[in-house]
């Protein structure tokens, strides 16, 4: 009984850590979006919200947004399907959050003779689980468009579903090369496989073994988040999006789902192409510098460095995705569809063939 309770407690702690990291980073992204765009456009950015006169560089704006959305009128159209209308934002946020569950944020933590794998859910086919969760997000946008009883919202939902489907097909094909190189569908094993080195100096990260796969994955991943330059499902300035009838916190949940999906794509990019939790020359017993010099470190320090490296890489990737968001213009709908089906997918299949040929040779 004690062992079962311990396992439940460990699982709850890992899930809580992952949810806290993803939700807090997703909330912080609302501030990053304002301030990073302001820096890029030579503006001050959001800085009006204050507590007792302290503005903290605008960090109180996410809190002000949450209070505003919680206190706004909760409007439901008269002809809307109430059950589906209320379920749509929950579905979008839930599956966006669940997608991060199998992404490892560290190797193994040893406590009291027990080895704890540092990922919320340990699965041998973790990549397939992430695909399943991301694909289920299509239901949220389609439900929102259909249940709103608004023709424009329905068109927005169809645009979003078409974009997400084309992006997810390209995502699946683009990382098959990574699975071939490291011989596993387990994200933890892929992260461990990236701990090898060429000549003891250059790490065998996916960035170096699958450079084309990285470009294709990032492009398709940005499309799956429905963010610029692929934000035509919800481009406010030109068209009406799938959640046009939503207000208050339900509107905020759709926005939060987009930010959480951005964090998930950043986490997947880190796990597959940037070494995951790997730190160059850091092993279980310490740092092994090129040339044979070893700096021994306690186990807890090694694990802390791994978790910190993973979190830092995810934050850098979020910054990079935001950089793209404020740099590139929006694609037209037909351009995005052509890019997905006639550009990303054929190149992804070509990458699989080339990777398999190199491995065979």
Image: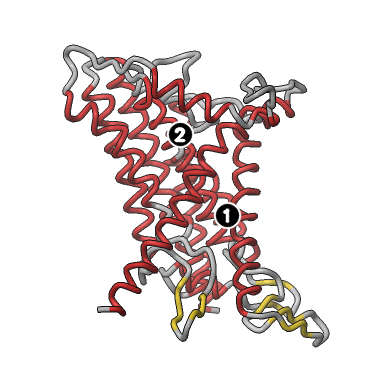
Residue underneath mark 2: 226
Q: Which residue corresponds to the image point at 62% horizontal and 81% vertical from the top-left?
A: 284
Tell which of 120 and 66 is nearer to you.
66
Is residue 349 visible to the viewer in this orientation of the structure?
A: no
Q: CA distance from mark 1 to mark 2?
A: 19 Å
N-term mark: 1 or 2: 1
Tell which of 60 and 36 is nearer to you.
60
Location of the C terminus (image quadrant): bottom right
Q: Position of residue 202 (x, y in %)?
A: 73, 72
Residue underneath mark 1: 214
Q: Position of residue 181 (x, y in %)?
A: 52, 72
Which quadrant of the structure image shows residue 124? bottom left
Task: Judge from the rendering whether residue 16 lies leftward or rightward of residue 312; answer left or right.
Answer: left
Location of the N terminus (image quadrant): bottom left
Dot 2: element = loop
Q: Which residue corresponds to the image point at 54% horizontal and 50% vertical from the top-left?
A: 266
Q: Which residue corresponds to the image point at 57% horizontal and 38% vertical from the top-left?
A: 28
Q: Are marks 1 and 2 in contact (CB under 8 Å)?
A: no
Q: Position of residue 205 (x, y in %)?
A: 62, 67
Residue furthest out toward the front? 52
Which quadrant of the structure image shows residue 121? bottom left
Measured along the vertical axis of the image, is residue 234 above or below residue 75?
below
Q: Position of residue 164 (x, y in %)?
A: 38, 39
Which quadrant of the structure image shows residue 126? bottom left
Task: Judge from the rendering whether residue 315 lies leftward or rightward of residue 88; answer left or right.
Answer: right
Tell which of 60 and 19 is nearer to you.
60
Report crowding for label 2: few under 14, some 14 to 19, many 20 or more residues within 10 A (C-alpha): many
Measured along the vertical axis of the image, is residue 188 above or below residue 333?
below
Colour basis: secondary structure
Q: Which residue corresponds to the image point at 61% horizontal and 37% vertical from the top-left?
A: 322
Task: Judge from the rendering whether residue 56 lies leftward or rightward of residue 62; answer left or right.
Answer: right
């Amino acid at each position: 009984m004690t062992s079962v309770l311990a396992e439940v407690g460990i699982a709850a702690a890992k899930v809580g850590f992952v949810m806290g990291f993803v939700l807090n980073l997703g909330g912080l992204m609302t501030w990053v979006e304002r301030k990073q765009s302001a820096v890029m456009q030579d503006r001050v950015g959001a800085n009006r919200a204050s507590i007792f006169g302290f503005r903290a560089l605008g960090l109180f704006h996410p809190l002000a947004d949450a209070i505003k959305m919680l206190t706004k009128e909760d409007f439901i159209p008269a002809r809307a399907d109430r059950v589906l209308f209320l379920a749509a934002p929950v579905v979008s946020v839930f599956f966006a959050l669940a997608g991060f569950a199998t992404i490892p944020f560290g190797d193994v933590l040893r406590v009291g003779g027990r080895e704890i794998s540092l990922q919320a859910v340990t699965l041998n086919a973790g990549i397939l689980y992430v695909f399943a969760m991301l694909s289920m997000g299509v239901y949220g946008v389609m439900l929102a468009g259909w249940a709103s009883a608004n023709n424009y919202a329905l068109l927005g939902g169809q645009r979003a579903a078409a974009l997400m489907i084309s992006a997810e097909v390209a995502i699946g094909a683009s990382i098959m090369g990574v699975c071939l190189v490291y011989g596993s569908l387990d994200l933890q094993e892929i992260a461990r496989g990236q701990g090898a080195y060429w000549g003891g100096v250059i790490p065998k990260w996916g960035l170096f073994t699958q450079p084309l796969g990285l470009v294709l994955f990032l492009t398709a991943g940005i499309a799956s988040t429905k963010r610029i330059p692929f934000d035509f499902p919800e481009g406010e300035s030109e068209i009406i999006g799938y959640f046009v009838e939503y207000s208050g916190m339900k509107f905020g949940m759709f926005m939060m789902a987009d930010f959480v999906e951005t964090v998930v794509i950043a986490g997947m990019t880190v796990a597959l192409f940037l070494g995951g939790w790997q730190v160059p020359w850091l092993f279980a017993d310490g740092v092994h510098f090129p040339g044979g010099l070893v700096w021994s470190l306690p186990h807890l320090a090694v694990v802390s460095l791994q978790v910190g490296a993973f979190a830092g890489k995810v934050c850098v990737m979020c910054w990079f995705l935001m950089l793209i968001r404020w740099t590139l213009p929006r694609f037209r709908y037909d351009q995005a569809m052509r890019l997905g089906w006639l550009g990303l997918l054929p190149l992804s299949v070509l990458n699989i063939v080339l990777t398999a040929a190199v491995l065979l040779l």
